[in-house]
Amino acid sequence: MSTAESAHLAWFKSSYSGAEGGECLEAAATPGTTHIRDSKAPTRAQLAFASARWAAFVRFVAQG
């Protein structure tokens, strides 16, 4: 997905990130895919994961 196309996604970040931005990741979901980008550089490269893979990663991280 190009940066221009991703500009139309509904990006969100954790409420723990605060309003200043800083060291945050932003995520956006499309059918079957989770997109991740750096909040400090939203026009730079981003990552895309199959939604099931992203959910497995989040579960793994949450387990500590």
Image (cartoon, rainbow, N blue to C red):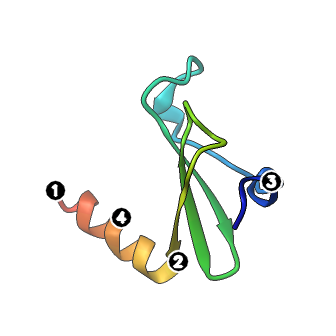
Q: Are marks 2 and 1 in contact (CB under 8 Å)?
A: no
Query: What residue is shown with label 3?
Result: 4
* Residue at screen point 20% across, 62% down: 63
* Residue at screen point 52% across, 77% down: 51
* Residue type marked 2: Ser
Ranked by sequence position, the earlier of labels 2 and 1 is 2
Query: What residue is shown with label 1?
Result: 64
* Residue type marked 3: Ala
Query: What residue is shown with label 4?
Result: 58
Ranked by sequence position, the earlier of labels 1 and 4 is 4
Give the CA separation, mark 2 to mark 4.
11 Å
Judge left or right: residue 54 versus residue 4: left
Describe the element under mark 2 as helix, strand or loop: helix
Describe the element under mark 3 as helix, strand or loop: helix
Q: Are marks 3 and 1 in contact (CB under 8 Å)?
A: no
Where residue 22 sits: x, y (%)?
47, 23
Describe the element under mark 4 as helix, strand or loop: helix
Name above or below for residue 10 compared with residue 39.
Answer: below
Ranked by sequence position, the earlier of labels 2 and 4 is 2
Residue extending farthest to the top is 20
* Residue type marked 4: Val
Where residue 9 sits: x, y (%)?
77, 57
Q: Are marks 1 and 4 in contact (CB under 8 Å)?
A: no
Where residue 44 sits: x, y (%)?
59, 45
Dot in front, 2 or 1: 2
Ranked by sequence position, the earlier of labels 3 and 1 is 3
Disc 1: CA contacts within 10 A as few (<14), some (14-19) or many (>=20): few
